[in-house]
Image (tube, helix red, strand yellow):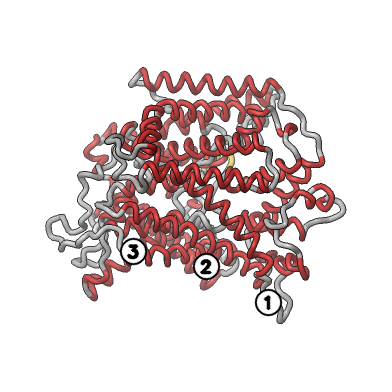
Amino acid sequence: MSMPSAKSTNTDTGSAPGREAVKDRGVTVRSIVYGLLLSVAIGILGDTVRYILHASFMAYSHMPMGNLILTLLSIIVCSMLAYRFGRRFLFSSSEWITIFCMGFISSLGPTYGISGYLVGIMVAPHYFVTQENEWARYLHPYLPGWLIPENEGNAMAWFYEGLPQGASIPWGIWAVPLFWWFTFLCAVALAAACLSIIFRKQWSEYERLVFPAMEPIIEFTTQGGTGRRWFPEFMKGKVFWAGFMLTTFVFGWNMIAWFYPQFPRFPTASARWFFFSRDFPPGFFFLSTVVICFSYFASLEILFSLWFFDVLFILEGGILSGLGVSAISPYYGRGRYIWQTAGGFTAFALWGIWVARHHLRDVIRKAFNPDRPAPDDSNELLSYRHAVIGLIAGCLYMALWLGWIGMQVKVIVLLILCMLVVYTTVSKMLADSGVVYLNPPTSAWGLLSRFLGGSHTFTAHTKMALSMSSRAVNHYRGLTMGTMTHINRLAEFLPGGKRRLFGAISAAFVVGMVTSTLYTVWLGYTIGGYNIQPNWLIIHAGVRQIQGIANSIKAVDSPIEPVNYWFFFAGAAAMALLNLMRYRFVWWPLHPIGFALSGTALSRLTSATIFVAWLVKLTMLKLAGAAFYRKSRPFFIGMLVGYILSVAAGVVVDAIWFQPDGHVVHKWY
């Protein structure tokens, strides 16, 4: 099902009969101010819910729950205030789109976005150094002092154990390292954002990708309150309320069991691995409400392919494992199987770039000659000239920063190219599939190592620089590019002010990143880093990263075995065949995205849910027809709204009665 055309959608929320018109002024100052406040709130909410309440994941998926909660509550509350006190509380569609987009990109800041990994890797080197791990010998000589806070006055111990009585937080030792980290992250974010703008027309207009995950968001932001009823316009009709009541009843019922453990509950939180054989990887069963709601808007072809290739992974991974070939973990793809998937992913990436070659050529020509009539960039968040300049500037700063900490020049060039390729491919997959839980089978670092024959060719400084920068160049969400790809789609519904929107989301990214990072540091010193949960993120992730650097420096890495490349090229060949069949035969049922993600962690964990979504949608289309399918749309919107508000209610209940032993209503899969 294709999305409604932005050109044919009236962004005036009062255009329908029976509504009072809400004049749409585009991206307004008040929407930007509110968006910045929302960005601060998202940073604090994401950290607080995970670190203090130990409850739901607010900032993990490609559709962060923290932003969904705060934006949806804002729309509902403003609708109620407008009905009760007057139209001054109404926001137009453009304003809600602006607010959502700013909260969307600021969600990259908390916990699993940037701040959790960043703080963890900054505090670990000095506090966890011992004679046994030999960090002082193999690691510390290669660590730039301007990137890691010094352990003056035992400051790192204070972070983990809490401040001594009367002591103050030593912000001074954090200032310089955080500044340089923030500038590097901003450079990566700028390059990725500009690249998303360059590809927008190719994906949205030429290839006509449908952006399924944006369908519910467009409903929320373009069907807000009118002041004539208590609730927003998307919250009406029996079909909507049926879906809403279904999820709120189930999750509300289960909350009773939080207080009375013997109370029966629905198995919505149950997740199990089912083992078929010792050699074969297990199947995972868990029905994720949020995945079902967003998958409803995706194509049957993609949903079926994601499930089909997960089944194929179980079969092939088990056969390879039985033959003594390293292929499973036992849960996920590893070893030579993941080489195969990485080959398919790389071939998918190169195919996408080849398809876009004419558009990329025209964009470059337009950048150097802005007076050219085509391609038209008037509807972009930045002109193509500024987007290309921003991409080059971001890459140049990345190169200088990485060179400054000792990375080899050839590695810098290839790493940046690999990062852009991986981020572009992840973003296109998100735009085409609507999957909200997705991680690529390889990273920029992984591709780089494969191209150069292994990490044994890297110097000690390069190994350190690669690992330190990994959370920026290897981010599973594509850092800002995956988010910006969806923001570009939402911007198509704006009547004007798109260049102002780019400035607003840039500010929101910085605010979200800085707020969540400083708040994490503050939490460490005030309540003690050992009390911050999950300790895996603040402690173990940083320790594992630093230990990995030390191990790589002191060990002599072996070259990559040639047989691995055979699996890589086999995966690339299989992807080429899948692409050929899809473009040559309309009846071909398998989408290449399924193979490109086969065996990855998030693909495995969501496979059963995606299969259920595919089966429900297929049954609906076959038995009831396309007309009924379209009429059922509000039901899934209602389910999603009910789920979001149930997660919000769970956070409130945990904060009042169960702190710090909260309940994970919204998981990371």
Question: Can the viewer see residue 350?
Answer: yes
Q: Find residue 654 and report its horizontal and vertical position in percent.
A: 52, 67
Q: Cβ–Cβ below 8 Å for labels 1 and 2?
A: no
Q: Which residue is mark 1?
A: 168
Where does the image place residue 162, in percent across and percent down from the top left? 70, 71
Look at mark 3 in the image and give the residue it sits on: 31
- Name the residue tied to disc 2: 654
- The answer to which quarter of the image holds residue 210 is top left
Q: Is residue 269 left or right of residue 28?
A: right
What residue sits 64% from the left and 29% below the top?
450
Q: Residue at x 65, y 37 (%)?
A: 409
Residue 292 visible in the displayed image:
no
Camera-nearest label, 2 or 3: 3
**Tag 1, which secondary structure?**
loop
Q: Earlier in the sequence, mark 2 or mark 3?
A: 3
Q: Residues within 10 Å of mark 3 (few under 14, many from 20)?
A: many
Q: Position of residue 423 (x, y in %)?
A: 50, 40
Q: Compared to 45, does 384 lie above or below?
A: above
Report the amino acid beneath label 1: Ser
Find the distance from the CA under tag 2 to the CA under tag 3.
31 Å
In this view, the residue in front, 437 or 383, is 383
Q: Could you say whether the residue bearing mark 3 is in a helix, strand or loop?
A: helix
Residue mark closest to the camera, 1 vs 2: 1
Q: Nearer the viewer, residue 276 or 216?
A: 216
378 versus 276 height, above or below:
below
Q: CA distance from mark 1 to mark 3?
A: 37 Å
Amino acid carrying label 3: it is Ser
Residue in the image at 44% along x and 48% along y: 483
